[in-house]
Image (cartoon, helix red, strand yellow):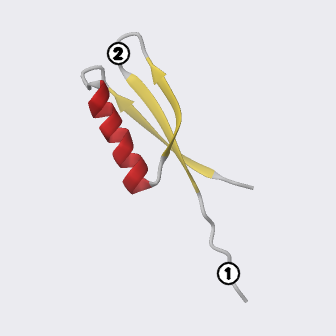
Amino acid sequence: MTTYEFRTLYLPRGISRSAAQRILTDEAEYGHWELDRLRLFADGSRRVRLRRRVIRAVRTA
């Protein structure tokens, strides 16, 4: 069974769309996160939920 760890980011309304894209691209490229959910609020702020797989090491005999 696949398990994930989650991380929530809050991007305030002052951040431009290109800056938000850059932040999420860096998280994906260097932190191995992928976009799980993005919620855009009426005031322009965004709440982003990222996820990545948890890889468990299996001990060999």
Q: Looking at the picture, does residue 59 appear above or below residue 56?
A: below
Residue at the location (38% across, 47% down)?
27
Residue 33 percent across, percent down from the top left: 47, 49
Residue reaching furthest bottom? Answer: 61
54 vs 16, nearest the viewer: 16
- The numbered disc on residue 25 is none
Quadrant assignment, res 13: top left
Residue at the location (34% across, 29% down)?
11
Disc 1 packing (10 Å; few <14; some 14–19; many ≥20)? few
Q: How far apart are the two marked residues, 2 and 1, measured between alpha carbons? A: 48 Å
Kind of residue at badge 1 = Arg
Quadrant containing the C terminus is: bottom right
Horizontally, residue 38 falls left or right of residue 13, namely right
Residue at the location (35% across, 15% down)?
44
Residue at the location (32% across, 40% down)?
23
Mark 2: secondary structure: loop
- The numbered disc on residue 44 is 2
Instruction: State yes or no: discs 2 and 1 in contact (Cβ < 8 Å).
Output: no
Q: Looking at the picture, does residue 4 appear above or below residue 15?
A: below
- The numbered disc on residue 59 is 1
Residue 8 percent across, percent down from the top left: 46, 37
Closer to us: mark 2 or mark 1?
A: 2
Residue 59 percent across, percent down from the top left: 67, 81
Quadrant assignment, res 41: top left
Mark 2 and mark 1 lie on one chain; the one further toward the N terminus is 2
Quadrant containing the N terminus is: bottom right
- Total marks shown come to 2
Kind of residue at badge 2 = Gly
